[in-house]
Amino acid sequence: MARVSLKRIQISKANTSMVISIALAAFMLTFTIIAGQALLGKRSYQNRVIGTKEKAVNQLQANIKATESLAISYKAFVSTSSNVLGGDPASNNDRGGDNAKIILDALPSQYDFPALASSLEKILGDNSFKVSTISGSDDELIQQKNSATATPVPVAIPFQLSVTTNLEGSKNLLSLLERSIRPIQVGTLTLSGSNDQLSVTISAQTYYQPGKSVNIETKVIK
């Protein structure tokens, strides 16, 4: 009986040791699988981060090269002996100024009706037109609504002008507006009076284009 009891105790101990060993082995296996999955997930995340960083670096290097090329092209554009109008870049007359200034005069980056009115008044006055009125909207809210964006588009600036001239002068007026450095689209033309004392009223619009904005963004890698 004593031998049988001793054997049972030994078997029980062996079984207990085996259960503990199996439990430890199962725990280690489970821990290894979970840790392995975590490491694989972390490795995959790090690969995505590295790939995104490499893409950003490549884009930055391409942008730097494009900037250098743009600077060279801009210098050549403004350093010509005569501008796009055939005038002297160093002159301040109507056909003077470098190409960059001419482009900005033709399509300014801000809504500025007073500047437009002054420009029209000078052009008309220099060509012997008697200006009656130049009207439009000097609204700062328009400028605020059309601030710099990543994809700017031209925005219309409507205006009306009235001049006193004769029949021949009315024809010259349209030709003068057509030759303006700023794009002017005539909507309506109203004539009243006689051939020698003709009142010409024009409703038209020109344009400005807001500046292009450059937005630097951050990206969360998941």
Image (cartoon, helix red, strand yellow):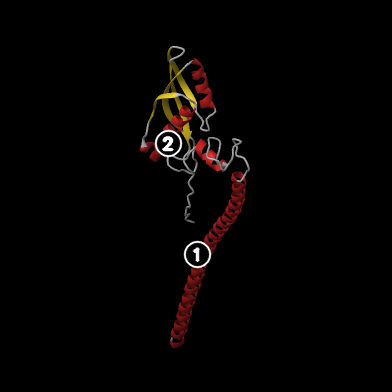
Numbered mark located on residue 84 in the image: none
Asked which quadrant contains residue 142, the reply is top left
Q: Please say if 171 is above or below 212.
A: above
**Looking at this view, is 127 or 118 the one in front?**
127
State whether residue 128 appears in this view: yes
The answer to whether residue 71 is left or right of residue 214 is right
Give percent across and percent down for residue 139: 36, 35
Q: Earlier in the sequence, mark 1 or mark 2?
A: 1
Please name the residue shown 49% across and 40% down the image. 152
Please name the residue shown 46% across and 76% down the image. 20
Q: How many neighbours does mark 1 have within 10 angstroms: few (below 14), some (14-19), or many (20 or more)? A: few
Q: Which residue occupies the extreme bottom position in the image?
A: 2
**Looking at this view, is 17 or 181 the one in front?**
181
Which residue carries the number 1 mark?
Answer: 38
Q: How many numbered badges does the structure rendering display?
A: 2
Numbered mark located on residue 115 in the image: 2
Please name the residue shown 46% across and 43% down the image. 149
The answer to whether residue 137 is left or right of residue 46 is left
State whether residue 222 appears in this view: no
The answer to whether residue 75 is left or right of residue 126 is right
Disc 1 marks a residue whose amino acid type is Ala
Disc 2 marks a residue whose amino acid type is Ala
Alpha carbon of mark 1 to alpha carbon of mark 2: how far? 65 Å
Q: Secondary structure at mark 1?
A: helix
Q: Please say if 162 is above or below 109.
A: above
